[in-house]
Image (cartoon, rainbow, N blue to C red):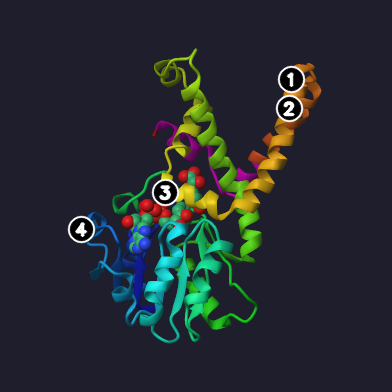
C-alpha cells in the first residue's frame, strides 16, 4: 500500500501501527523516530521497524506516509523538524486526541505539495510506551479523519482511509472543531472525572488508602484504570482542547447540581427517570457492537 511509512513516536499508538503495518504487509519499509533513546532501543529489541532514527527529519526522507504519534503538545516541534525533508506528494497525518490544535500547530510549517490529513484512532488503553502496543488495537474501532479544508486532495484522503481500513478500523470524516466537541464529551471529560474522583478519594482524610483499595466496587476500579493513563498525554489533551472541555464541563456541572438537588429533596422519580434513560444509552452502545459485557468483564479482571 505504501513504500516507506515513517512513524514519529513509538509509544502505545505508534508501536501498534508499526506492528499492524508489519503484520498486514502494508509497507515495504517502516522508519521509526523517537526522541527517547530508551524507546528506540525497545523498538529495536521488539523488531518494530526497518530503520530507527533519533531525529524525525531523517525518518521522513523518502516516506510516502508520515504518521506523528507524539503527545498533542509536541506536534508543532515535529512539523518544524520534518518540513524540509518531506518528499513532495507525501501524506502527513497524526493520531492526536485533539484535532483543532494539531491543525494550528502543524499546517503553517508544512510545504505546498504535502497532503496534510490529521487523524484520530478512537482506540487505546491506559498504558504507554513501545511495549504496550498490539497489532489488533484498531480492529473494529473508529478512526476519525479531519481534513483541515475542503480542498484537500480526494485521492490522498482515499489512500489514508484505505490505510486505516486495512488496520481494521471504520473511518469517518468530520471537521477538526466538531471532532474536538464530540471527543470532549465522549472521552476528555470522562477522563477528567476519573482523575478527579480518584484524587478526591485519595484526599479524603477519614477514609484510608487501604480501605479505598479493599472496598473498591467495580465503578471505582474502572475509574482507577482510566486515571492511570499517561500524565503527559492527558495534560496536553486538556491544555489543547480547552474551549470544548470547558463548554462540556459547564453543562456537566449544571446537571450534577440538579442531581444533588434531587437527592437532597428526595426526588426519587427524577433520579429513576435519568437512570432509566442512561441504561438505554448503555444498551444502545452494546447493540452497536462498540462494547460487550464480556469485554467489560475482561477489563475488570485486569
Ligand atoms: N493512549 C491512548 O489510548 C491514545 C492516544 N492517542 C494519541 O496518540 C498520541 C500518542 O499517544 P501514546 O502512543 O499513548 O503515547 P506514548 O507516551 O505511549 O508514546 C509517545 C511517544 O512519543 C515520543 N515523543 C514525545 N515527544 C516527541 C518528540 N518531540 N519527537 C519524537 N518523539 C517524541 C515519546 O518518547 C513516546 O515514545 C497522543 O497524541 C495521544 O493523544 C490517540 C488514541 C488513543
Ligand atoms: O483506555 C480507554 O478507556 C480510552 O479511552 C483510550 C483512549 C484514550 C484516548 C483517546 O484519544 C482514545 C482512546
Earlier along the polypeptide chain: callout 4 or callout 3?
Answer: 4
Frontmost of labels 4 and 3 is 3
Tag count: 4
Q: Are marks 1 and 2 in contact (CB under 8 Å)?
A: yes
Q: Position of residue 164 (x, y in %)?
A: 47, 67
Which region is colored magenta? Answer: 283-301
Earlier along the polypeptide chain: callout 4 or callout 2?
Answer: 4
Q: Distance of mark 4 from mark 2, alpha carbons?
A: 51 Å
Q: Secondary structure at mark 1?
A: helix
Q: Residue at x 33, y 49 (%)?
A: 132
Q: Position of residue 222 (x, y in %)?
A: 49, 33
Q: Are marks 4 and 3 in contact (CB under 8 Å)?
A: no
Q: Is residue 238 left or right of residue 73?
A: right
Q: Is residue 269 above or below residue 168?
A: above
How many residues crowd mark 1 within 10 Å: few (<14), some (14–19), many (20+)? few
Q: Distance of mark 1 from mark 3, alpha carbons?
A: 37 Å
Residue that numbered label 3 is attached to: 232
Q: Distance of mark 3 from mark 2, alpha carbons?
A: 33 Å
Earlier along the polypeptide chain: callout 3 or callout 2?
Answer: 3
Q: Secondary structure at mark 2?
A: helix
Frontmost of labels 3 and 2 is 3
Q: Secondary structure at mark 3?
A: helix
Query: Under 8 Å from ligand 1: the CB of mark 3?
Result: yes
How many residues crowd mark 3 within 10 Å: few (<14), some (14–19), many (20+)? few
Image quadrant containing the N terminus? bottom left
Q: Are marks 4 and 2 in contact (CB under 8 Å)?
A: no
Residue that numbered label 4 is attached to: 41
Residue that numbered label 1 is attached to: 263
Earlier along the polypeptide chain: callout 1 or callout 3?
Answer: 3
Residue that numbered label 2 is attached to: 259
Q: Distance of mark 1 from mark 4, alpha carbons?
A: 55 Å
Amino acid at each position: 500500500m505504501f513504500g516507506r511509512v515513517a512513524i514519529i513516536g513509538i509509544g502505545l499508538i505508534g508501536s501498534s501501527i508499526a506492528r499492524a503495518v508489519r503484520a498486514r504487509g502494508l509497507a515495504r519499509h517502516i522508519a521509526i523516530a523517537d526522541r527517547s533513546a530508551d524507546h528506540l532501543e525497545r523498538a529495536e529489541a521488539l523488531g518494530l521497524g526497518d530503520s530507527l532514527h533519533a531525529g524525525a527529519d531523517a525518518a521522513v526522507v523518502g516516506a510516502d506516509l508520515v504518521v506523528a504519534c507524539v503527545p498533542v503538545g509536541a506536534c508543532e516541534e515535529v512539523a518544524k523538524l520534518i518540513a524540509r525533508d518531506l518528499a513532495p506528494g507525501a501524506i502527513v497525518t497524526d493520531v492526536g486526541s485533539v484535532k483543532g490544535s494539531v491543525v494550528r500547530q502543524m499546517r503553517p510549517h508544512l510545504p505546498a505539495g504535502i497532503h496534510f490529513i490529521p487523524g484520530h484512532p478512537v482506540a487505546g488503553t491506559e498504558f504507554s510506551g513501545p511495549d504496550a502496543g498490539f497489532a489488533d488495537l484498531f480492529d473494529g474501532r473508529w478512526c476519525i479523519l479531519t481534513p483541515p479544508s475542503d480542498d484537500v486532495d480526494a485521492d490522498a484522503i482515499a489512500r489514508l482511509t484505505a490505510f486505516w481500513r486495512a488496520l481494521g478500523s471504520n473511518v469517518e470524516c468530520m471537521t477538526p472543531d466538531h471532532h474536538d466537541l464530540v471527543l470532549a464529551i465522549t472521552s476528555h471529560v470522562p477522563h477528567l472525572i476519573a482523575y478527579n474522583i480518584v484524587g478526591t478519594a485519595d484526599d479524603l482524610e477519614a477514609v484510608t488508602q487501604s480501605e479505598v483499595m479493599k472496598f473498591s466496587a467495580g465503578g471505582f476500579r474502572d475509574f482507577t484504570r482510566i486515571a492511570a493513563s499517561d500524565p503527559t498525554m492527558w495534560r496536553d489533551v486538556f491544555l489543547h482542547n480547552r474551549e470544548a472541555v470547558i463548554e462540556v464541563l459547564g453543562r456537566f456541572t449544571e446537571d450534577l447540581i440538579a442531581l444533588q438537588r434531587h437527592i437532597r429533596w428526595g426526588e426519587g422519580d427524577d433520579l429513576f427517570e435519568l437512570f432509566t434513560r442512561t441504561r438505554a444509552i448503555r444498551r444502545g452502545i452494546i447493540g452497536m457492537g462498540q462494547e460487550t459485557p464480556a469485554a467489560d468483564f475482561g477489563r475488570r479482571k485486569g
